[in-house]
Amino acid sequence: MITLIRQELLGNLMTFRFAAFVFIMLLLVVAKPLCLLRITNNGWQVTTLQ
């Protein structure tokens, strides 16, 4: 009985870790273009690609 509960907790922990990993990766992917757009809009970027 205890091992079953332990396996369940371990499975939940792994799925939570996986979900957190995917969430962080998505945040990074979304944050990069937003930061770049913000920098170009503020005029910090001196060299503009044409």
Image (spheres, helix red, strand yellow):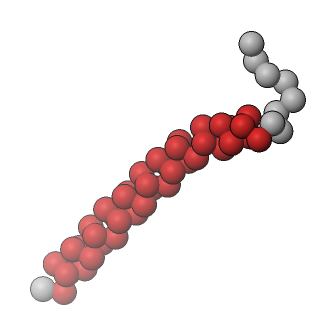
Q: Position of residue 34 (x, y in %)?
A: 60, 42
Residue at x 77% of width, y 41% of height: 42
Residue at the top extreme, as displayed: 50
Q: Quadrant of the C terminus?
A: top right
Q: Where is residue 3, by image quadrant? A: bottom left
Residue 10 x %, y %: 30, 72
Q: Nearer the viewer, residue 23 or 12?
A: 23
Depicted 13 relative to depicted 2: above or below: above
In this view, 23 is above or below 32: below
The quadrant the N terminus occupies is: bottom left
* Image point (16%, 78%), residue name: 4
Residue 12 position (above or below residue 28): below
Residue, far right: 46
User: Residue 11 falls in which quadrant of the image?
Assistant: bottom left
Q: Is residue 7 above or below residue 27?
A: below
Number of numbered tags placed on the structure image? 0
Residue pictured at 58% horizontal, 46% vertical:
31
Compared across the picture, whether 16 is left or right of 39 comes to left
Q: Nearer the viewer, residue 27 or 3?
A: 27
